[in-house]
Image: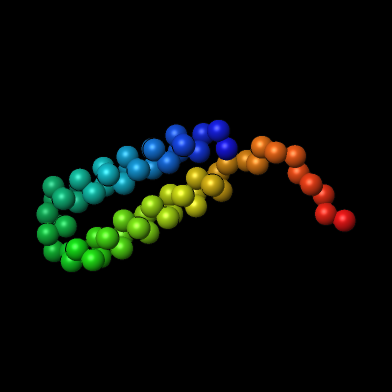
Amino acid sequence: MRFINMYLIGYVILIIGIAMALWQSGVLNNVAPIWLGIGVIVAIGLGIMMAVSSGKPTGPVESQR
């Protein structure tokens, strides 16, 4: 999981870029603020889930008997 921080930073930059593009095109003017907040929370949650799932465990794996 050594690249998890870099992955999350890249994901946040991607989300910011998408938000700026939607803002410049005027799409965000027609969306209620609560839905913007919900979308941001969902996007952050997806980014965290994808970053965690892309990392490999670094510690020893214990076998279950």
Is residue 16 depicted above or below 36 in this figure?
Answer: above
Write down the quadrant of residue 17 in the picture. Answer: top left
Is residue 57 depicted above or below 23 in this figure?
Answer: above
Question: Where the N terminus falls, by quadrant?
Answer: top right
At a point 19% along the width and 51% down the height, the residue shown is: 22
Write down the quadrant of residue 16 in the picture. Answer: top left
At a point 39% along the width and 38% down the height, the residue shown is: 9
Is residue 43 depicted above or below 31 in this figure?
Answer: above
Write down the quadrant of residue 56 in the picture. Answer: top right
Q: Where's residue 43, x and y in %?
A: 37, 54
Q: Where's residue 64, x and y in %?
A: 83, 54
At a point 25% along the width and 65% down the height, the residue shown is: 35
The scheme the figure's colours follow is rainbow
At a point 31% along the width and 63% down the height, the residue shown is: 38
Report whether 51 appears left or right of 12.
right
Q: Where's residue 21, x and y in %?
A: 20, 46
